[in-house]
Amino acid sequence: MMVESASETIRSAPSGQNGVGSLSGQADGGGGGSSGGGAAGPAAGGACRDSAVGADSNGEMSPAELLHFQQQQALQVARQFLLQQASGLSSPGNNDSKQSASAVQVPVSVAMMSSQMLTPQQMQQILSPPQLQALLQQQQALMIQQLQEYYKKQQEQLHLQLLTQQQAGKQQPKEALGNKQLAFQQQLLQMQQLQQQHLLNLQRQGLVSLQPSQASGPLQTLPQAAVCPTDLPQLWKGEGAPGQPAEDSVKQEGLDLTGTATTATSFAAPPKVSPPLSHHTLPNGQPTVLTPRRDSSSHEETPGSHPLYGHGECKWPGCETLCEDLGQFIKHLNTEHALDDRSTAQCRVQMQVVQQLEIQLAKESERLQAMMTHLHMRPSEPKPFSQPLNPVPGSSFSKVTVSAADSFPDGLAHPPTSAAAPVTPLRPPGLGAASLHSGGPARRRSNDKFCSPISSELAQNHEFYKNADVRPPFTYASLIRQAILETPDRQLTLNEIYNWFTRMFAYFRRNTATWKNAVRHNLSLHKCFVRVENVKGAVWTVDEREYQKRRPPKMTGSPTLVKNMISGLSYGALNASYQAALAESSFPLLNSPGMLNPGSASSLLPLGHDDAGAPVEPLPSNGSSSPPRLSPPQYSHQVQVKEEPAEAEEDRRPGPPLGPPNPSTAGPPEDRELEEELPGEELS
DNA sequence: ACTCGCCTAAACAGAA
DNA sequence: TTTCTGTTTAGGCGAG
């Protein structure tokens, strides 16, 4: 029946590597980008250049920029609203032109801010999704700030108009003047409301968390940043405003409006919004382009070597110009990266990249510490293998010294090299070098051997795999087995297996076609997976004996393997993993589902419980104990449909408490689905 | 160099 | 007819 297909599959494009390659490719791209000299550099420079000059270069619109676009739209609406109001109320004097000029500048600066960052594609290359999110947040915050400034300027404009009207209105009848003032005040109110609404909207998007001061009273906080703070209160006081200062303020503001607008464009004011990293902030009080310039020129003062010079080329983002020696490089630096808008813009970009990376690093470090703290919470833990791996400064452990030089799991954000914070390895704590060295094709044979105690591994890194888009270092077979064994009745439909995969691993929430095919392929291919016809359809069970057969226990016989495994496992997961591995490899019988009840096996395997899933399931439905509840035969008697494996003779029928003694009764489905409803919390 | 285990892709068939 | 499920084959890769 399957005769014909064999021949024509010639072109077997190396698609097999594609999936893998994409993973590692992402990682590489991220590393290169963050190091500053990579491919992201040129484009970053280009983006900067655009923003510095034209500031209208938002050609592509990615989801990340959609928000900016929305905000710009909101801004436009606000601007139009204000323009309409102003033009309707004020005489079309020079104020109007001034206003339109300043109003135009705000979107410009906004566009600047969005394009000041890298293009979305580049950002994705450089930053991981969480980083992008953080970046987005910061940009939102920056935008809000500019928005506030913009509103404030508009207010000032209105006040100016009010004042000019007042002065001009001295000749006019009093009532007309009063009406106009009233109208202006209404305008102000409306504008405030508009502003508040916009801010609320931004906050509601969940991407912006304003500091209380910013959120509560934007108008009140603004004057400090703006131009003539002293005059404003008096203006606000309204009618009896003194004419003289107002007159001054008019001129002053006329200047300052443009001045601050350009300031806003050239100086993104990160310091105000991103407090966490003060050492990267620019001097806030000097809103000139000089500050970044000073920054860039400061690099030149390092003697001997230069941080921007390495491997014979200029490390300036996006440059990569080859320079034979340092002198030539210095010359190049002074000519190509002199004090101009482009350089300063690039500098700002780099600054923000570093900031975001550091923020991300801080977050990840915190998470890592929490994870490791959690892992070390378990009391006893004889630590035979040195490695005082532990994290939390507060705890009694010392600092982490996990061979930090190791690589990081695929898809994880690599810590920035420039980060001031100590570099902490971002990898699932339970994973050791064994799984790390396999950068691309995540789980290979060795991984499967070393990390095969998948349940304990999973139990400890459950959250990690659930959230991080990292390929789990397990084979499909072991994962499928784990999924099946986690259920009370040790059987799952294909769809339920799918669900388990997606529930447990963020990685499997994409590329569904690929891995689902692989799952099906594995189910069919491996004899250890037995298909059982049920009333409700077919379910898959695990033939433990076949599974063990499939993987000969090398562990016991090979001290080197054991040693590798031990050294490879981080301390927290070590005990469980080791023992589970021993259980799986050395005591295959013990390892079978039913035998691992805490009571009987605890003496030998106090911790592991391995794949039986015992550790994870809070409640094996019945009686919680039911020691030999699912003894090996349990599956075997179900195995009638397909090739009855030799185990069929063991049809002892342990009378599994739970439900279906035999497949024919088909009781389990409901239970199984009930179990299915309890999501992945089992492993947490 | 070879084998083995694993992964991916794909074709195909049958059932729903 | 489409989709899902299950089977099978083929080729590539890494490790032993």
Image (cartoon, coloured by chain):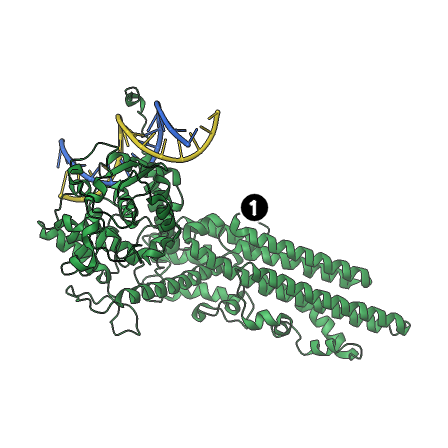
Chain colours: A green, B blue, C yellow
Residue at horizontal 60 percent and vertical 53 percent from the top: A70
Apparent side of residue A7 relative to residue A166 in the rendered image (left or right) = left
Apparent side of residue A552 relative to residue A180 in the rendered image (left or right) = left
- Number of numbered discs on residues: 1
Which quadrant of the figure contains the C terminus of chain A?
bottom left
Which chain letter matches label 1? A
Task: Classify mark 1: residues with Cα within 10 Å, few (<14), some (14-19) or many (20+).
Answer: few
Confirm whether residue A547 shows in the render.
yes
Foreground residue among A526 and A399: A526
A656 relative to A140, above or below: above
Foreground residue among A364 and A489: A489
The image quadrant of residue A180 is bottom right
Foreground residue among A392 and A379: A379
Residue A117 in the image: x percent, y percent? 50, 55
Which quadrant of the figure contains the N terminus of chain A?
top left
A152 relative to A661, above or below: below
The image quadrant of residue A601 is bottom left
Residue A593 in the image: x percent, y percent? 21, 49
Foreground residue among A527 and A406: A527
Residue A358 in the image: x percent, y percent? 40, 63
Residue ID for mark 1: A59
Q: Amino acid at mark 1?
A: Gly
A86 relative to A129, above or below: below
Residue A383 in the image: x percent, y percent? 17, 66
Secondary structure beneath label 1: loop
Confirm whether residue A314 shows in the render.
no
A633 relative to A186, above or below: above
Residue at horizontal 16 percent and vertical 38 percent from the top: A647
The image quadrant of residue A261 is bottom right
